[in-house]
Image (cartoon, rainbow, N blue to C red):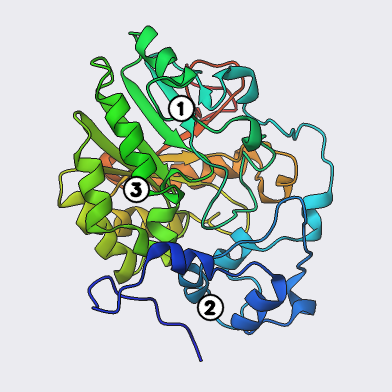
Amino acid sequence: MSFTPVSLNLPAYRDWKVVASESFQTLEALLNFCEIDPAESGALAHEGFKLRVTRYYASLIEKGNATDPLLLQVLPTASEFLRVPGYQRDAVGDQLSVRVPGLIHKYHGRVLLTLTGACAVNCRYCFRRHFPYSENVAGLRMTDPIMRYLAENKDVSEVILSGGDPLMVSDQKLITLINGLNQIPHIRTLRIHSRVLSVLPERVTPELIEVLNHFAGKVVLVTHINHPNEISRHNQHAFQMLSGQGFALFNQSVLLKGVNDCAKMLINLSHKLFESRIIPYYLHRLDKVEGAAHFDMPPVESRRIYRQMRECLPGYLLPAMVDEIEGQLSKIPVAIESDEYQF
């Protein structure tokens, strides 16, 4: 019997922490639920970067389809054990930019806080799959080094919450952080990058919205959706709850071989995002992280796909195709007509 996602409108709405605890964490359980023969899947357990998939996300996977694009994003395979030249454990130089534990400062005017290493879904292409979270969990109180760093660096106006997934922490931890940020006048924007918004829609509650509304400045939410099949009426309801409060919603996707390497599919994604009150923001080329080389695509192919998107989409629905390069002071737009970067 297939799993039916819980509607946020139902009285039987369940606590998100309980729902998250029921996620699939073994290959056997996930493949059995998806009605897929393990021999056909090519799956191989990975103890270093374990499998974790919410039941909601799994319910969107086509039963019996070992090449379903949503399944391929979360299924560990033997390809992850290949060591490919040019693919590194710290693909974008995050660890070189840690100023105090839990705070990454790469770009002018904004910093990133790693609140937790936990995610609702472990994406196999994750560029932080090797990040040492145990050494880099952000302290949230005004007496912690992070808050002192923010107070002293007056050119920082935006704080980005990341992880892991920042919405895997409790409302109480979020309000502690927000209370601290509200005491720093030059922090005007709070940006939250979260896969949870789409894969664990139960997390979007009236209580969470109340917490976010407590921030004195502007709140921006960035979802991470790679394929139109990841959007359903259930997470659309969560998006509408957020946009209805005036929060700005953007999406970033990663271009992945075998998952969304099709212009028609990505065009459909842009339209579905817009229907969900989300603006397409970035289309990332794969960060060259060790263990994910099998998701990468030749530059000529990624440019071809993007040109097709550009021909079919209005400007406001066309995400910027970018690379993140270690040592650069911003994301780098990909020059679509050549192999050169567009500065």
Disc with the residue nearer the chain's start (3 vs 1): 1
Judged left or right of residue 129, residue 219 is left
Residue 78: % across, % down: 81, 59
Residue designated by label 2 = 62
Neighbour class for label 3 at 10 Å: few (<14), some, many (≥20)? some
Identity, as a three-letter code, of the amino acid under mark 3 = Asp
Residue designated by label 1 = 112
User: Eyeballing the image, is 102 above or below 122?
Assistant: above
Disc with the residue nearer the chain's start (2 vs 3): 2
Depth check: give the residue in front, 218 or 275: 218
Name which residue lies at 46% across and 17% down. Answer: 107
* Label 3 secondary element: helix
Residue 264: % across, % down: 43, 59
Q: Nearer the viewer, mark 2 or mark 1?
A: 1
Identity, as a three-letter code, of the amino acid under mark 1 = Leu
Residue designated by label 3 = 171
Depth check: give the residue in front, 169 or 339: 169
Name which residue lies at 31% across and 60% down. Answer: 272
Name which residue lies at 64% across and 67% down. Answer: 25
Neighbour class for label 2 at 10 Å: few (<14), some, many (≥20)? some
Name which residue lies at 53% across and 74% down. Answer: 61
Residue 153 appears in the rendering: no
